[in-house]
Image (cartoon, rainbow, N blue to C red):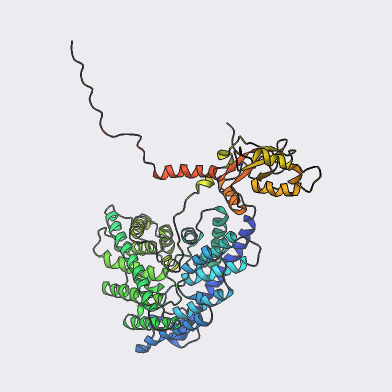
Amino acid sequence: MSIDTHKRDFSSNARLPGICALAAAIGMLGMVAAYALLNLIHLFTNLFFYGAFSFADRSPADNTLGPWVVLVPAAGGLIVGLIARFGSEKIRGHGIPEAIEAILFGKSRMSPKVAILKPLSSGIVIGSGGPFGAEGPIIMTGGALGSLLAQCFKVTAAERKTLLVAGAAAGMTAVFGTPVAAVLLAVELLLFEWRPRSFLPVALACAVAGFMRAAWLGTGPLFPLETAPPAAISLLSCAILGLASGALACGLSVALYKTEDIFGKLPLHWMWWPALGGLAVGIGGFIEPRVLGVGYDVIGDLLHQQLALKVAVAILVAKAIIWVIALGSGTSGGVLAPLLMLGAGLGIVLGHVLPGNEPALWPLVAMSATLGATLGAPLTAIVFAFGLTHDSNALLPLLTATLVAHGFATVVMRRSIMTEKIARRGYHIYREYGVDPLERHYVDEVMTRTVETIDAALPVHEALATFFGTSQTHRAYPVIRGDALVGVVDRSSLLLLAERAQAEPRGLSLGDALAHRAPPVALPNETCRLVATRLAVHGLERLPVVSDRDSMRLMGIVSRSDLVKPAQTHFEEEHKKERFRRFAPRRAAKPRNEA
């Protein structure tokens, strides 16, 4: 049996090693950017809450400002509003939607301003008590660095997208030490494809950032945890918790954009909105100081059951309110850390009534489920929760609850918190993707092999009268010399050649008229997708198929109607309902009548 050697599992790409080398450099830059951002947060926390120029890691919850703490987040919001107004408006928001928009609608081009102002503004907001995490800003900052480096080289928009995402994923790896989850985040949210040409450079950047993080910040999980193996009854608890987490995720998304609409109706320039949001953060922080800042220490306390139920409820309510208001005001900050805290708080609240005899498991499970449902990235959330805790016993409950929550959110919500903002700007993002039917089939499977041709020795006028008269059967014909393709002519191109032929005293043959024109062709081992793109680029309806570009031996012709054939097969697979077996019991055979 012959094997078609041109048919591959993945497309080949000779530029992949060079892109991987750039991605490795971007992984280093992502780690440096993450390290700088974390230190900026520490610096501004000390400046705002303790009046000290220090990079020590201190929680804003331990401040002694009393009622004056209300003004601190408002001051931070005011500064960031001014930076956005006179610096770059693109620093507003939590970063991931902005990265998606740059990828899909901006050819992955980002400005140097974003790379500088995004970490600065996020450091000010979070350092002044903003209830955000560092991951959204570092995704935006790392993406900007990747895009800027890519703009220094001659690369395609697709390659620039890969390098932008490599920087974003490397930044997330550097902050949390979860390289596999960062790669999955890239696949589920940013790349919009599953190809080695993009997956491998992103994974390499995450690996480089992960090794550098181990050297700079040490190894080990951010929130080490070990729970007992789940009991069978935990399946029911996971389903209940998944539904509750999905409902929380949907509620947060709706509340966020309702709040954004309210800010949009205020008779104030958007520059002042972050200050108003910061005022709400300050009030919440005065009531419950643990909701200020990133709150990694609070997440750890929730996961290890070190907070009373009443405190957990207060944190859940206060954090949700101030996070929605602050983010709706258009300030700068991430969503992952707040969602982790809110999910863990939900797990604490419900863990007291869920069966399963493992209270420590439910904050972790709800944390993952809430994150996965909110982002629309369940695999990222599952692996992320494992990477943060290294709790292998929790994998099965994480899988169950997170997928239930994701299913709930996809049924109830039209868009996620990641894509709603982009949709409000007039862009639609369809996040489901699969193998394109045109990628699965090759030209030699769909082309027409019997082709009517014109001899290149035929004069132009004779060809026009013979093939394009009243008996014309095709809109265009390949012109051949022997079995080699010379070109393709239709009525309009032949009329132009006829005008040129009038100047020739002995007439002009088709071969001579087309001698210096290299016709666009298709090869039998090219995918239908590639040929469809070529037809669109040249504005053609059909292409001759040749064995190779050297001999130009004509093998057939492929038209737009031929390229519809794979789509027809795909349609039948998706919509044609068939039954091959019946489960109804057979009827007993009737006994024959005796003679």
Q: Is residue 538 left or right of residue 383?
A: right
User: Based on the displayed image, in which of its 4 quarters is residue 309 positioned?
Assistant: bottom left
On the question of residue 517 being in view, the answer is no
Residue in the foreground of this view, choosing between 499 and 302: 499
Residue 161 location, x and y as percent?
A: 56, 62
Furthest-left residue in this view: 594
Residue in the foreground of this view, choosing between 101 and 334: 101
Image quadrant where one finds the N terminus: top right
| Number of numbered discs visible in the structure rendering | 0
Residue 427 location, x and y as percent?
A: 46, 64
- 250 to 470, vertically: above or below: below
Residue 480 location, x and y as percent?
A: 70, 39
Residue in the foreground of this view, choosing between 46 and 521: 521
Image quadrant where one finds the C terminus: top left
Furthest-right residue in this view: 505
On the question of residue 564 being in view, the answer is yes
- 286 to 460, vertically: above or below: below
Residue in the foreground of this view, choosing between 364 and 490: 490
- 577 to 12, vertically: above or below: above
Residue 485 location, x and y as percent?
A: 70, 41
Furthest-top residue in this view: 595
| Residue beneath the point at 65% across and 39% down | 467
- 473 to 38, vertically: above or below: above
